[in-house]
Image (cartoon, helix red, strand yellow):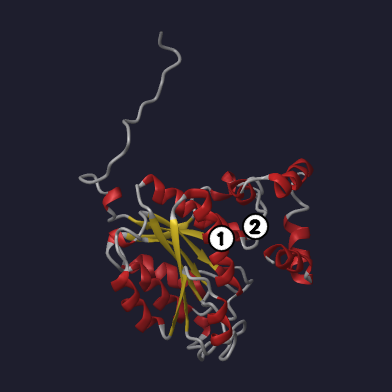
Amino acid sequence: MLNSYALRRALSDKKYKKIFVERLTEPLHLNLISAGVALFGSYRAKVAFDLMVRQQYAFPVLFAADEAKKLGLKRIQVLEFGVATGAGLLNLCDCAARTEAETGIAIEVVGFDTGSGMPPAIDYRDMPEYFQEGDYPMDFEALRRSLPGRCRLLIGDVAETIPAYLASVTAEAPVGFISVDVDYYSSAVNTLKVLDGRPEQYLPLLPVYLDDVGMDGANTWNGELLAAAEFNARQPMRKIAPFNLLRSKRVFKNAQWIDRMFAAHIHDHPARTPATAKRAQQAYIPNEYLR
């Protein structure tokens, strides 16, 4: 079922043009190798070669699970803000299931949405030339029936649902990835308060996907980028920054999702605090010039 969905999605006009620009501008030998990976590769290889539907979910969920494993954790949670019809949430559930099978880390998925479409824009910062009241409504009952057991859907204003959600998060199952697809600046400001919890409620470094930063009219004075900048200004020990050197680490460099991938740095996390930070072994640099 997922494969047929992936094919339909790839052949749609908008996605077909995106694939043409992103994929066919990459080196020919990499595209040839990726064909073999698509047919015979492991899940991890397919993520590395950008062969998953919504790579912006596949990569960060796998990254978060790997980071959790390094810390000796057995469970994490991944969050999507802005569910709309739920295609992204169901895809996130699929990525979670496949990552869980790959890593052994149990992954719970939580979706947040008003359930009634977008509210009125407050001013230019919400970019009303792109988003307006009533956009992206949800068929709640149809979506609820389709959700797997690993997924929860929290309906309501995030100003109310986030505090209740954070009260339930434990250090044994911290937040490992956050997708922010709420379009408005004003909604993003409230959404990023999900990072205001106790440090142990998060991985020390967790990917944050900011979906709505790619329009020509987006800048650091409006939309989700402004919300992130204001979060950084008010949080001395929590910072949202572009995911460091991500493009240079990827096999395929031209994918747009790379520019939307950020990281939340939890600088007050015990793993980043001198008194409590631990490593498996001492760092050592060999010197091949010494005999």
Up-down relation of residue 231 to residue 238 (above or below): below
Instruction: Name which of mark 1 and mark 2 comes first in the sequence.
Output: 2
Left/right placement of residue 265 relative to residue 32 reads left
- Nearer to me, 149 or 262: 149
Q: Residue 129 at x, y = what percent?
A: 61, 84
Left/right placement of residue 45 relative to residue 75 reads right
Identified by mark 1, the residue type is Cys
Q: Which part of the image, by quadrant, shows the N terminus?
A: bottom right
Up-down relation of residue 23 to residue 164 (above or below): above
> Could you tell me which residue is drawn at 52 percent across and 82 percent down?
126
Left/right placement of residue 102 relative to residue 289 reads right
Q: CA distance from mark 1 to mark 2?
A: 9 Å
Residues packed near mark 1 inside 10 Å, few (<14), some (14 to 19) or many (20 plus):
many
> Where on the picture, by quarter, is residue 199?
bottom left
Q: Are marks 1 and 2 in contact (CB under 8 Å)?
A: yes
Q: Which residue appears farthest toward the left when viewing the image?
A: 275
- Residue 29's disc is none
The kind of secondary structure element at disc 1 is helix
Residue where numbered disc 2 is placed: 52
Q: Residue 103 at x, y = what percent?
A: 48, 49
Residues packed near mark 2 inside 10 Å, few (<14), some (14 to 19) or many (20 plus):
some
Up-down relation of residue 219 to residue 138 (above or below): above
Residue where numbered disc 1 is placed: 95
> Could you tell me which residue is drawn at 35 percent across and 61 percent down?
174
> Could you tell me which residue is drawn at 58 percent across and 49 percent down?
247
- Nearer to me, 3 or 62: 3
Identified by mark 2, the residue type is Met
> Could you tell me which residue is drawn at 40 percent across and 78 percent down?
190
